[in-house]
Image: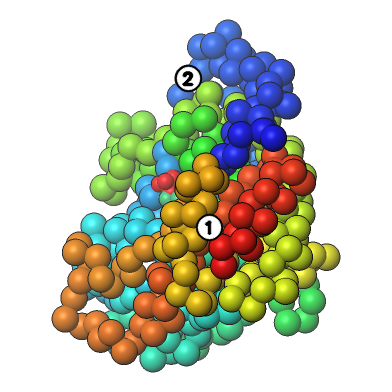
Amino acid sequence: MKKLQMVDLKSQYEKIKEEVNASIQEVLDTNTYINGPLVHQFQADLEKYLGVKHVIPCANGTDALQIAMMGLGLQPGDEVITADFTFAATVEVIALLQLTPVLVDVDIATMNISLEAIKKAITPKTKAIVPVHLFGRAANMDAIMEIANEHNLFVIEDNAQAIGADYISKDGSKKKVGTIGHVASTSFFPSKNLGCYGDGGAIFTNDDALAHTLRGIVNHGMYERYHHDVVGVNSRLDSIQAGVLKAKLSHLDHYNKARKEAANKYNNAFASNSNIITPSFDITADDHVFHQYVIRITNGKRDGLLAHLQSKEIPCAIYYPIPLHSQKAYKDDRYNESDFPVTNQLVNEVIALPMHTELDDEQIKFITDSVLEFV
Ligand SMILES: *Cc1c(COP(=O)(O)O)cnc(C)c1O
């Protein structure tokens, strides 16, 4: 059996080596390391793929979130609601900009931000909601946009984990996630669904004026060379990474399909074990692109399972082991434990199994047999 990895980027690279190498070579041959033609080509390709008017490439997904919030003109003291159960980058930039993070609980079935919790957290100071499409599953954007419109709030989609996923509206119409809120961010970190070979990120919006503002912020607040109109940052996607991404974007749908098929095989293998709760999804839809395959172990054996799998050299991980409201950096007297029953439960039950584009049946069988023999 091929050695198991949480993410197998090497096998994936072997299959697209020629395209990727040619893109990188083009950057070297043309000496266009920063803001070269490949950056613009990738940007245009991604705009077309997503069906969004503006993609603004930047240095990483954390910057993308920060720049999105700067572009919206959020001010210190403004309250920004986001999920307690996510990667820390989301709350980090809120705090960094001296906005007030308002962490709220998630739904047990989707692990995405809870609509009830959002509604409860809104105050006159609330300015924005940041839904995260966690583990690749689209958050409930119809309802989130409805709440936001009612209260005049911005919606910033953190799309670091779900690029390529569809959001399917109540009326059946489809849009790519990251194109529904006022603005969205994504990450091209190597292990993400569309990953480069270093750091990268992007901001998406359909708002022309906001796109203009964001393009200046990523480039030292310059709209005209050496005229600094606003305080900006230096956050660029370099041309080599853009070349890698341009090559990989044409494979994204195929990659997401491979992830979904692997998830379906895992789900089928676990279906008859009542101690394992699998992520439910519709195999014929694309509203979950399985950035991670995360199950819940409900009989208290999660930590034992982690050790068992590790002893068999099966990589696995806990995303996420500590609720954000309990992290030293983000603790606050404003929070009550009783407001986070789901996150507090999830941190003890979740375990992520290997998920990538190159998993084969033999590997999946070995992993699922190993889980089932223990749980
Ligand atoms: C990866 C990730 C980010 C940050 O992306 P970087 O490119 O690593 O800065 C932000 N939010 C979520 C939910 C992520 O998973």
375 vs 335: above or below: above
Q: Depth check: 258 or 360 in front?
A: 360
Question: What residue would you read off at disc 2?
Answer: 33
Residue depicted at 56% across the width and 40% down the height: 5
User: In the drawing, does residue 55 fall left or right of residue 362?
Assistant: left
9 vs 318: above or below: above
Query: What is the distance, in whole Å, between disc 2 and disc 1 at their CAs?
Result: 37 Å
Residue depicted at 50% across the width and 85% down the height: 115
Q: Residue 324 at x, y = what percent?
A: 31, 68
Q: Quadrant of residue 153?
A: bottom left
Residue depicted at 24% across the width and 82% down the height: 335
Q: Nearer the viewer, mark 2 or mark 1?
A: 1
Could you say whether the residue bearing mark 1 is in a helix, strand or loop? strand
Q: Quadrant of residue 90?
A: bottom left
Residue lying at the far front of the rendered structure: 373
Give the crowd class for mark 1: few <14, some 14-19, many >=20 residues within 10 Å. Answer: some
Which label belongs to residue 94?
Answer: none
301 vs 3: above or below: below
Q: Residue 211 at x, y = what percent?
A: 50, 52
Q: Residue 374 at x, y = what percent?
A: 56, 63
Q: Residue 352 at x, y = what percent?
A: 53, 57
Mark 2 and mark 1 in contact? Answer it, CB < 8 Å. Answer: no
